[in-house]
Image: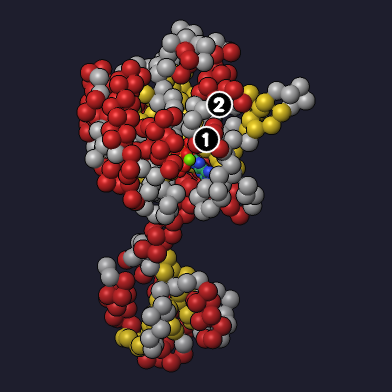
Amino acid sequence: MPTLLPAELERWQSVESIIKKILSSYSFKEIRTPLVERTELFQRTIGEQTDVVSKEMYSFLDRKDQSLSLRPEATAGVVRAGIENGLFYNQTQKLWSMGPMYRYERPQKGRYRQFHQVNMEAFGFEGPGIDAEMVLLTSRVWRNLGVDSIQLELNSLGTAEARKIYRSILVEYFNDHIDSLDEDSRLRLEKNPMRILDSKNPEMSDVIQAAPKMNDHLDQESKDHFTGLLERLDGHGIEYVINPRLVRGLDYYTKTVFEWTTNELGAQATVCGGGRYDGLVKQLGGQDVFAIGCAIGLERLVELVELSNKKDQNGQPKIYFVAVGDKAEAKSSKLAELIRDQFEDCILEVNQDGGSFKQQFKRADRSESDIALILGDEEIQNETIGIKLMKEGGDQETIPEGKLLDTIAERIGT
Ligand code: ATP
Ligand code: MG
């Protein structure tokens, strides 16, 4: 369970504040539920056969021997709290929450035992408009954070009834190919056969590729819903990939499921996942209300934002102006203004507070500049400027002063 240090938290806070603003602009309101719930709540919600409940929960007995668990996700607690407080009675709700979640997983980059999610859910909306809105909202989050290497994957799991039928078709198929299944999948065959589709074992990829697809067994209602969502996304110019093997890790999903994934974070590629869970509120003893939600993993998002912004900065050429002597100092400042006029994308730092050539070059190095411009007495006298490509380690060249802007344009490729 990592500790977040002050330097990191600055980045977290700016990401969080951008997300909160966007949530509010889509009319979502905050809710805060406890970190601990009855173990039974998660068993009934997420499903006993899922990895999360069967192997990843932090469960313990309290002083009255009641089994409690640290929350592995937010939806179960939000639905429980909503039912207890009458939030779903004759009204719609758009709720968000943010905070730590706990799963006993094998810790690695992008996967921790305490991690943070921003969770958003909408209750009481039947049509695909709200599904589309949730995609638009998350897509706006990526855009405002400067993240563009992220793709949307979609699938429909159908209604609970359609899933039951598909499930038996799938069990029959995998039973016919039992020799191709690994041990994990054979266990899943009885308890949670759809999870086999999610297996990452390369030896099983052929048998999974050839398996019957949920899409071919969807009920009409779910088909219409899914088409409605795709039409809306097309209308907004949102790109997506339909992934028939996207099943998600929790049992409560129906109809739409989606994930936002990236190629930038290695194996831990999913930044956000969610979908519909129309039956969940009723299943937990509440009204029969429609529901959809998704969760963003903040550790992965903050890392992705960092990577994306680094790239941007790399794309922005950096120049350091080395100037030794009073005349050189005055002139460097004038030339710098001309360069800034012409190259708005450049980061240009003019040396301040003197120093020898050697000291100033050190500063240029430390600031990770691409180019150093050099002015000393000799250059002033000859009306020339020295130029050195810092990262390529070549020799210093001397150019006539009149050629400065052209030379920079050439060097930084504009
Ligand atoms: P994964 O397939 O990566 O295990 P998941 O399907 O278990 O993800 P969800 O339960 O849908 O994840 O949680 C939503 C998001 O929370 C994930 O997409 C991910 O960004 C983040 N997340 C989940 N588990 C962890 C973890 N152990 N550490 C860090 N982030 C996590
Ligand atoms: Mg997981």
Q: Quadrant of the C terminus?
A: bottom left
Q: Nearer the viewer, residue 339 or 208?
A: 208
Q: Residue at x 32, y 25 (%)?
A: 168
Is 77 on the left-hand or right-hand side of 175? right
In this picture, residue 77 sits left or right of residue 221 = right
- Earlier in the chain: of badge 1 and badge 2, it is 2
Between 274 and 180, the residue placed more toward the observer is 180
Q: Position of residue 136 (x, y in %)?
A: 34, 33
Q: Amino acid at mark 2?
A: Phe
Do callouts 1 and 2 mark residues in contact (Cβ within 8 Å)?
yes
Q: Assess disc 1: are there few (<14), some (14-19) or many (≥20) residues with their C-alpha within 10 Å of its C-alpha.
A: many
Q: Is residue 19 above or below residue 95?
A: below
- The Cα–Cα distance between marks 1 and 2, rounded to whole angstroms, is 9 Å
- Most foreground residue, 231 or 267: 267
**Colour pattern of the rendering:** secondary structure
Does the beta carbon of the residue at mark 1 sit less than 8 Å from ligand 2?
Answer: yes
Number of numbered discs: 2
| Residue 392 is at least partly visible in this image | yes
Can you give x and y, in whole percent of width and height, for residue 78 in the image? 54, 23
Q: Circle 2 is placed at which residue position?
A: 42
Report the amino acid beneath label 1: Val
Q: Is residue 207 left or right of residue 51?
A: left
> In the image, which disc is placed on residue 52?
1
Left or right, 312 with reference to 326: left
Q: Nearer the viewer, residue 202 or 119?
A: 202
Tell me the residue at 22%/33% (across/down): 234
- Quarter of the image holding residue 342? bottom left
